[in-house]
Amino acid sequence: MADTLKKLSLKTHGVRYKILIAFVLMSIIPLLATLYLIAAYVPLANTGTLLEIACIFFIAAGISFLGFLLCRSIVNSVIALSVHARILANGNLEHRIDDVDCDEVGTLVQSLDVLVDQLRNTISGPKRSGDDIAGHSMKDELTGLYTMAYLMTRLDEEIELGIRYQRPCSLIVINLDNFKSYGSVHGQLAAEGAIIEIAQLIKKTVTETAEKAARLGDDEFAVLLPGKSKRFAIGLAENLRSNIEKLPLSTAKGQKITATMGVSENPLDGSNGRSLLHRARERIQEAKRSGKNRVAI
C-alpha cells in the first residue's frame, strides 16, 4: 500500500509531468465531463441545437489547446533553465540562453548569469591581472587597497555587466579634508599613519566579493559597488563619512581630517568608468566650495 501511494505521489516526478497532470485536471477532464453531460441529458431535437453544441465543443477545445501551449512554454523554459544550470555546473561558464522571457524563469536565468559572471571575474581577475595591470601594481603598497588602474578596469567591466543585465553600478569617491595641513604639522610618518587608519576603515565597508576599495591618490579613495543603486551608495558614504570624522586626527589648530565624498551611478551619471569618476569628482569640488565634510550627490 505504501509503495502504491509513493508511486501516486508527485514529489518524485519532474516539472513536466506535474504540469501535464495539472493541465489534464484543469482542461481535459472537465471537457470530457461536459461532453458526457451533453450527450446524456441534452436532447438533440434539431440541427440548430447540434450546431450550438458543436460550437461550444470547439471553443472549449480551442481554449484547452491554448492552455496546453502555455503549459508547454512554461515546461520548456524550466527545462532550459535546468539544462543551463547543469552545463554551468560542469564547468562551461560561457554558456548562455539567448532567448529569455520576461518572467520569473527569465529572472532566474539572468540572476544565474550575473552570479556566473561575478564568479568568472573573481577567478580570472588575478590570472588576467596577476600583480600587474598595464605595468601598474594591483595593490597600493602603503594601504593594501587596490590601485586606480585596477579599479578602473573593474569599474568598466561592472558597468558592462550592468548594461547587459539592466542593473546599477555605483561609485563613491572619497577626498580627505585638511589632510595636507595635517601632514605639514605632524610630518610624513604621521600622515602615512592617518592614511593607513582611514584605509582600514574604508576596507571594512567592503562586505561583498565584487565590491572593491581603492586608493586613487595621496588623499583620495574610491569604493566600487556593483549592483548597488545610488541610494544605497549614499547611505554607505554617509556612514563612512561619519566614521572618518570620529577618528582622532586633527592639527594643533583643531582642524580635523574629515572626508568629502561624491557619488555617481551608471547609467544616470555616465556609461563608462571615466565618466562616473569625473562626475563624482565634480560633485566633490562643488561640495568643497560650499563646505567640507559632506556627501555630494
Image: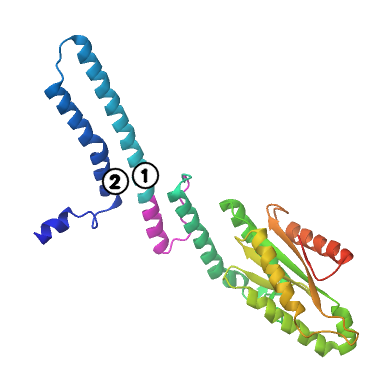
Colour scheme in the image? rainbow
Determine the image quadrant of residue 232.
Answer: bottom right
Determine the image quadrant of residue 159.
Answer: bottom right
Please report whichever mark, 2 or 1, sits nearer to the chain's N-terminal start. Answer: 2
Q: Secondary structure at mark 1?
A: helix
Q: Viewed as shown, does residue 184 lie left or right of 36?
A: right
Q: Can you tell which mark lies on residue 27?
A: none
Note whether residue 142 is visible.
no
Q: In the rendered view, would you say 9 is above or below 251?
A: above
x then y, percent, for residue 175: 79, 71
x then y, percent, for residue 112: 47, 58
Q: Secondary structure at mark 2?
A: helix
Q: Residue at x 36, y 38 (%)?
A: 70
Q: In the rendered view, would you say 279 is above or below 17?
A: below
**In front: 140, or 268?**
268
Determine the image quadrant of residue 1.
Answer: bottom left
> Magenta stretch?
80-99
Q: Which residue is identified by label 2? A: 19
Q: Can you tell which mark lies on residue 74?
A: 1
x then y, percent, for residue 163: 61, 52
Labels 2 and 1 touching (C-beta < 8 A): yes
Q: The disc labelled 2 sits on which kind of residue?
A: Ile
Question: Looking at this rendering, what residue extends furthest in the left direction?
Answer: 1
Dot 2: few (<14), some (14–19), or many (≥20) neighbours within 10 Å? Answer: some
How far apart, in angstroms, are the residues tagged by discs 2 and 1? 9 Å
Tally of numbered tags: 2
**In front: 235, or 207?**
235
Note whether residue 101 is visible.
yes
**270 magenta-colored:** no
